[in-house]
Amino acid sequence: MSYYTVLGLEKEPFSTSPDPEFFYESREHRAALMRLLIEIRLKRGLSLILGDVGTGKTTLSRKLFQLLHERPDTIFHMILEPAYETEELFLDSLLRTFAMKLDTPNPSILDYREAIKTYLFQKGVEEDKTVVLLIDEAQKLNTLSLEILRGLLNYETNEYKLLQLVLLSQMELLPRLREIRNFLDRVSLKYVLNPLDEQGTKELIEFRLKQAGGDSGPSFFTEEAIGEIHRYTHGYPRQIARFCHHALRELVAESKPAVDAQIIRSLITREVR
């Protein structure tokens, strides 16, 4: 029997997988999501979401996908691992992402670019679709790949960009973009996700427990325990989820009514050894 069923929950509340049903809309995360939706709806082109590891960028991307992928006027594509050594490999990956094939036996860079251009004009102009390409872990893109994306953003009508590009990245990408001529000029939205404060940490824990089928919410954790969790995790959502998972397992093992500060301090001591 899983620990969460012992606690009367229907699902694991603190999985670190990017499940959009467990996307906690903090003030910053909700603002980022709403601004992304606006930029995509207006077809402004390039949106950049930045944040340290564990701030919730990937879960945000899954929530955006959930909201858009079933819309008849939107075509949503994602690249999750964008590390490509050459231009050809990246362009080939883009074609496969767009479900396209080239009949040319040995396509050149120009062939790839023309095929993608044709696709974007067909979908964006002839079919009046909004084409979204979301790239997670965008800090892994090399300079050649970034130059290709910069070129794709040139495809536009008099009113709008044909490709809505969303880059989710760690902060290290920003200085690299500054080195590419005219790239930052194309950024329509730049938003930085920061860690949660203590109140946000409490609300995230409460939200996840409720989503997992819990009625009592934060009563699984005392106020002192939540304070200790925030201090140790510094408010990073992924670390909060990971640590709360261990805390609930400890709660079941010790048969206590709630996770208290003593349980949290004991877990911290084990981790720092």
Image (spheres, rainbow, N blue to C red):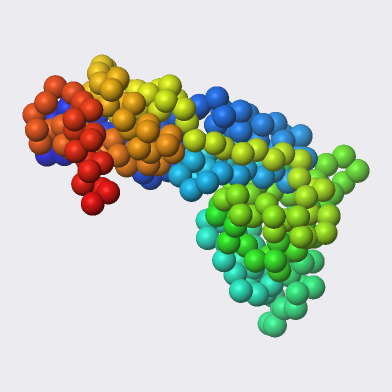
Q: Where is residue 104 in the image (x, y as percent from the top left)?
A: 71, 78
Residue at 42%, 25% in the rendered image: 198
Q: Quadrant of residue 147?
A: bottom right
Give the vertical position of 11 relative to 171 (above or below). above
Give the vertical position of 116 relative to 43 (above or below). below
Asked if residue 5 shows in the view, the reply is no
Q: Position of residue 206 (x, y in %)?
A: 35, 23
Q: Where is residue 79 in the image (x, y as percent from the top left)?
A: 56, 56
Asked if residue 143 shows in the view, the reply is yes
The mark total stands at 0
In the image: residue 1, left or right of residue 14 = left
Residue at 25%, 21% in the rendered image: 222
Residue at 37%, 41% in the rendered image: 239
Residue at 27%, 26% in the rendered image: 225
Looking at the rendering, in which quadrant would you find the N terminus?
A: top left
Q: Which of 208 and 54 is in front in this view?
A: 54
| Most distant residue in the bottom direction | 106
In the image: residue 185, left or right of residue 88 = right
In the image: residue 194, left or right of residue 35 = left
Give the vertical position of 145 relative to 70 (above or below). below
Q: Position of residue 167 (x, y in %)?
A: 64, 49
In the image: residue 20, left or right of residue 186 = left
Q: Which of 223 and 5 is in front in this view?
A: 223
